[in-house]
Amino acid sequence: IYTSVRTESGTETDPAEKYDIRSSQKRFAGKSISLADGLGGMIKDEYNAEVLIRNLPLPLLNSVSAPALMLEVPKTVFQDSETKTRLSETLLRGIAAYAGR
């Protein structure tokens, strides 16, 4: 699971930074990490697998004005319909749990 490398800041020191698309994730970095931790925990529990959470300086993640992450899944997961469905349901439960906080 990848999250933005941006750190959360309560206030922008430069007024222009508030509207800079490259800084959009700053306000949501903590929430993105919380979402990644929650999903990672659910995947660990469901699959008894190691889940790595890392920061990635990806412009797509940095520019999102909401909690954001990128999930990398082995190709083999998508070759088996049952496993693909199970992972999808796990991710939906994780997102619902995060949204219900």
Image (cartoon, helix red, strand yellow):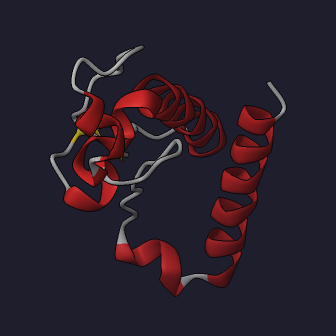
**Viewer-side residue, 97 vs 6:** 6
> Which quadrant of the structure image shows residue 97?
top right
In this picture, residue 84 sits left or right of residue 14: right
**Residue at left offset 37%, top offset 77%:** 75
Q: On the rendered image, what quadrant is the C terminus found in?
A: top right
Residue 68: x and y in percent read 46, 47
Give the farthest residue toward the right: 100
Give the vertical position of 74 relative to 26 (above or below). below
Residue 49: x and y in percent read 46, 41
Give the vertical position of 3 relative to 81 (above or below). above
Residue 67: x and y in percent read 52, 41
**Residue at left offset 29%, top offset 61%:** 60
Q: How many marks?
A: 0
**Residue at left offset 53%, top offset 28%:** 31
Q: Does residue 53 appear in this view?
A: no
In this picture, residue 5 sits left or right of residue 8: left
**Residue at left offset 63%, top offset 70%:** 83
> Which quadrant of the structure image shows residue 71?
bottom left
Give the vertical position of 31 relative to 19 (above or below). above
Give the vertical position of 95 relative to 87 (above or below). above
**Viewer-side residue, 58 vs 96:** 58
In this picture, residue 37 sits left or right of residue 101: left
Residue 20: x and y in percent read 27, 47
**Viewer-side residue, 27 vs 16:** 16
Q: Does residue 90 appear in this view?
A: yes
Give the farthest residue toward the front: 15
